[in-house]
Each structure stands twice: as C-alpha cells, then as structure tokens.
Image (spheres, rainbow, N blue to C red):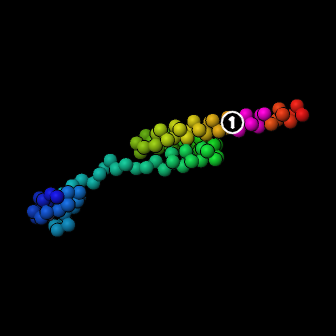
C-alpha cells in the first residue's frame, strides 16, 4: 500500500494511476518483457520443418536484439535446423548411394 500524492487516499502499491483522483502515481513498466514469438515458433518448427525453422531462427535472432528476448532460443533453433538439414541430406545421400549400389 502507498498513499496518493494528489488526494492522500490509500492505494495499491502497484497502481499507476490513483483510482480516486486520477493522478499518476507510478510509471508504466517501459521495460516490459516482450516474448519473442518468432524464436518460439522457430524452435518448434526446427524439429519438423528445418528449413522454415532456420529462416525463423534468423528472423528471431534479429528480433531478439530489439525485444531483448529469445536470443538463445533462436540460436538453438538455427543449430537444430542445421543438424536436421544435414541429417536429411545425409539420409538422401545414403539412399541415393544405396540405390545406385543395389
Ligand atoms: Zn489520488
């Protein structure tokens, strides 16, 4: 609890505006944590559609600078996407080699 400097009423300590007189008593959280949705989408898609995961990971990494969130997640998405892509390429290569040998 705190007191309003405008009217002196007791108000909730996390109020931004006094409910009695409307005076501003606090500050909006300007450093509100925004979630980097792109990074989250990237990490999920990197498992299923690595190419899109890789692209979203790149976008998420770019966004992580302005949002200050999701940097690690974006990097993880890029790494997982690359591993998945390499695995897919290897599987295709092995299948082609296997088919040509057979
Ligand atoms: Zn007040």
Give the prevailing secondary structure in the magenta stretch. Answer: helix
Question: Secondary structure beneath disc 1?
Answer: helix
Can you tell which quarter of the image residue 17 is in? bottom left
Q: Residue at x 61, y 44 (%)?
A: 47
Q: Which residue is mark 1?
A: 87
**71 on left or right of 95:** left
**10 on left or right of 56:** left
Can residue 66 be seen? no
Q: Residue at x 21, y 55 (%)?
A: 26
Residue 55 at what x, y percent from top left? 59, 43
Question: Does the beta carbon of the residue at mark 1 sit less than 8 Å from ligand 1?
Answer: no
User: Number of labelled discs?
Assistant: 1
Residue 35 at what x, y percent from top left? 43, 49
Q: Is residue 5 above or below residue 85?
A: below
Q: Within the magenta stretch, is there residue 93?
A: yes
Please name whichever residue, 95 or 31, is drawn nearer the observer in this view of the structure: 95
**101 on left or right of 21:** right
Q: Which residues are magenta?
A: 88-94
- State the residue lying farthest toward the right: 102
Q: Quadrant of ligand 1?
A: bottom left
Q: Residue at x 12, y 64 (%)?
A: 9
Q: Quadrant of the C terminus?
A: top right
Can residue 69 be seen? yes
Q: Within the magenta stretch, is there residue 57?
A: no
Residue 78 at what x, y percent from top left? 57, 38
- State the residue lying farthest toward the left: 8
Residue 49 at what x, y percent from top left? 64, 46
Q: Quadrant of the N terminus?
A: bottom left
Can you tell which quarter of the image residue 43 is in? top right
**2 on left or right of 52:** left
User: Dot 1 surroundings within 10 Å: few (below 14), some, or many (20 or more)?
Assistant: few
């Amino acid at each position: 609890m705190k007191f309003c400097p405008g009217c002196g009423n007791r108000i909730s300590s996390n109020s931004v505006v006094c409910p009695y007189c409307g005076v501003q008593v606090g500050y909006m959280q300007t450093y509100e944590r925004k979630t980097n949705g792109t990074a989250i989408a990237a990490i999920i898609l990197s498992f299923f559609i690595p190419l899109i995961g890789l692209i979203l990971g790149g976008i998420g990494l770019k966004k992580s600078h302005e949002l200050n969130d999701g940097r690690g997640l974006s990097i993880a998405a890029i790494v997982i996407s690359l591993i998945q892509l390499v695995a897919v390429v290897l599987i295709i290569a092995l299948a082609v080699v296997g088919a040509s040998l057979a």
